[in-house]
Amino acid sequence: MGDFSAAWLALREPADTRARRAALVGRLTDWLVRTRPPRLEVLDLGCGSGANLRYLAPRLAARLGVRQDWICVDRDPELLAALQRELEPSAPRDWQVRTLRLDLARGVPALPIAPGTLTVASALLDLVSEPWLRALLQTGAAAHSPMLLTLSYDGRATLKPQHPLDGIAIALANAHQLRDKGLGPALGPMGPIRLAELAAGLGYSVTLRRSDWKLQPGERAIQAALVEGWSAAALEQIGGTATVRWTAAIAGWREARLALIEHGHSRMRVGHRDALLLSLIHISEPTRRYAISY
């Protein structure tokens, strides 16, 4: 989407919460229990208004029972302020949350990844470049840092009822995803697969699971926002090469899909992946160098 406004983040949070793979959180907490940390340091990259914190912190607390020290990183001061406002009335005493205003484009060395830090992020992998991701994984592997990187868009989208231009519009939007988002040429929909390939070579066990949005007819606002985003990206992608015919075709696709949404006839499945990376140094299988599970 490329929209990181508080309104968009609030709109997508219910869909994200339903889509997250709880089993990966369970596997992560099992691993953390075995490592017996006296406290848990969590680094949330591109935290936005705090959806990761709201989802993960209580689930980690239920199993671990240790103090959690969160560092929530984002470049947008308004989103960081919104995170603090929402957290303050209900934050348990054993959660320590600090916000850090930092542009991830400054590079991985600027990130406070201490040994054993749990690194988390949501909807990030499609925005970063391969060199940036490789640097993050190398730093995390050196620190034996587990990672839970969730809700990464993987390019799949099924829209019902179908329209003849669905495939073309989504393909153009996916191509647009590969543009530089400030961190180098973006991985786009290939982000989850490249993550698995790079991480496995660094001694992580890697588990990828689908975490698709399944949007129902009543979820009009988020569906409309997706169609607006896809159509804008498609038009920008064809850009100067666009004929009047193609510009009109994409505009017609947009209007047809919005009409279906408005009348409660639209369903969407939008492909995402959750990824769990665990350091094998804590697994009693010294001959096992890596494992990828899909």
Image (cartoon, rainbow, N blue to C red):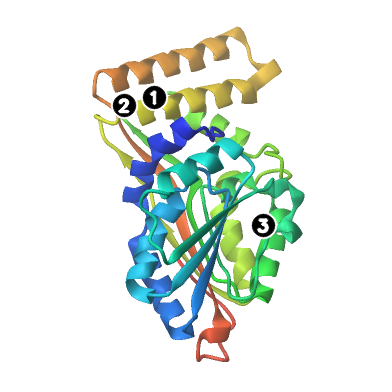
Judged from the image, the secondary structure of the residue bearing numbered disc 3 is helix
- Residue 174, given in percent of the width and then of the height, sits at 56, 36
| Amino acid at pointer 2 | Arg
Looking at the image, residue 189 sits to the left or right of residue 23; the answer is right
Cβ–Cβ under 8 Å for marks 2 and 3: no
Tag 3: amino acid: Leu
**Image coords of residue 249 (percent x, y):** 49, 14
Q: Is residue 183 left or right of residue 25?
A: right
Q: Which mark, by number, is residue 77? A: none
In this view, 158 is above or below 26: above
- Helix, strand or loop at disc 2? helix
Tally of numbered discs: 3
Report which residue position mark 3 lands on: 133
Seen in the picture, residue 50 relative to 68 is either above or below; the reply is above
- Residue located at (59% from left, 8% from top): 244
Q: Earlier in the sequence, mark 2 or mark 3?
A: 3
Q: Residue at x 52, y 10 (%)?
A: 248
Question: Which residue is pictured at 31% across the width and 42% down the height?
Answer: 214
Q: CA distance from mark 2 to mark 1?
A: 6 Å
Are discs 2 and 1 less than 8 Å apart at CB? yes
In what quadrant of the picture does the C terminus appear? bottom left
Give the image quarter of residue 183.
top right
| Residue located beneath label 1 in the image | 224
- What's the mark number on residue 220? 2
Q: Position of residue 259 (x, y in %)?
A: 32, 16
Up/down of 11 relative to 255, above or below: below
Depth check: give the residue in front, 215 or 243: 215
Alpha-carbon distance for marks 2 and 3?
A: 34 Å
Q: Position of residue 12 (x, y in %)?
A: 40, 38
